[in-house]
Amino acid sequence: MNGQDEQGVYPPPPVPGWPPTVPPDVYPPGPDHPPASPGVWPWFIVYCVVTALFCLCGCAVGTIFLVVDPVELEMDPVEAKIAGYMYIGISVFFFVPYIIAPFLPRRRWVWIYDLVLICLGMTSCCTLPACVALLIFWIKPNCRRFFGWD
């Protein structure tokens, strides 16, 4: 009907720039406006998976100590069993926290939990460079906001 609605009234012309566009970080986080995922989050997941794989390697080494004949390892049988169980125990002890970290809810305590995992990684020369980079970006406000701080 020539642009008229059923009541015979023309709709108002569109106003340029309406509705106003507001950057997503202006809105406070909430159910309608969840905080954006920080850029460090995918790298933290990679860090957790790689560290968990290191722990699985420790379990494999412990299994080798238990399965291989101690004479081939040039060890006493009791010493080989103790070493094998220690490798497996310590590896499982650290495997569990790293593998569950990416699946935890976004809460303040999880941000601290993940921060502790990053700091634990700083005790190894293999993961120290990655952990320093993660730590720099982990303490930034957008990452804290992602976990409910601020």
Image: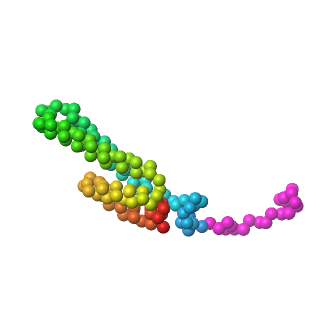
Question: Residue 127 occupies which quadrant of the picture?
Answer: bottom left
Is 55 positioned to the left or the right of 22 in the image? left
Between 87 and 125, the one nearer to me in the picture: 87
Q: Main secondary structure of the magenta part?
A: loop
Q: Is residue 23 visible?
A: no
The answer to if 100 sits in the magenta stretch is no
Give percent across and percent down for residue 15.
72, 68
Is 111 positioned to the left or the right of 128 in the image? right
Q: Is residue 82 visible?
A: yes
Identified at 44% across, 51% down, the residue is 104
Q: Is residue 11 above or below residue 90?
A: below
Between 84 and 25, the one nearer to me in the picture: 84
Identified at 30% across, 56% down, the residue is 120
Give the magenta range: 1-21
Give percent across and percent down for residue 147.
46, 60
Q: Quadrant of the N terminus?
A: bottom right
Between 138 and 7, the one nearer to me in the picture: 138
Give percent across and percent down for residue 47.
36, 51
Identified at 54% across, 59% down, the residue is 34
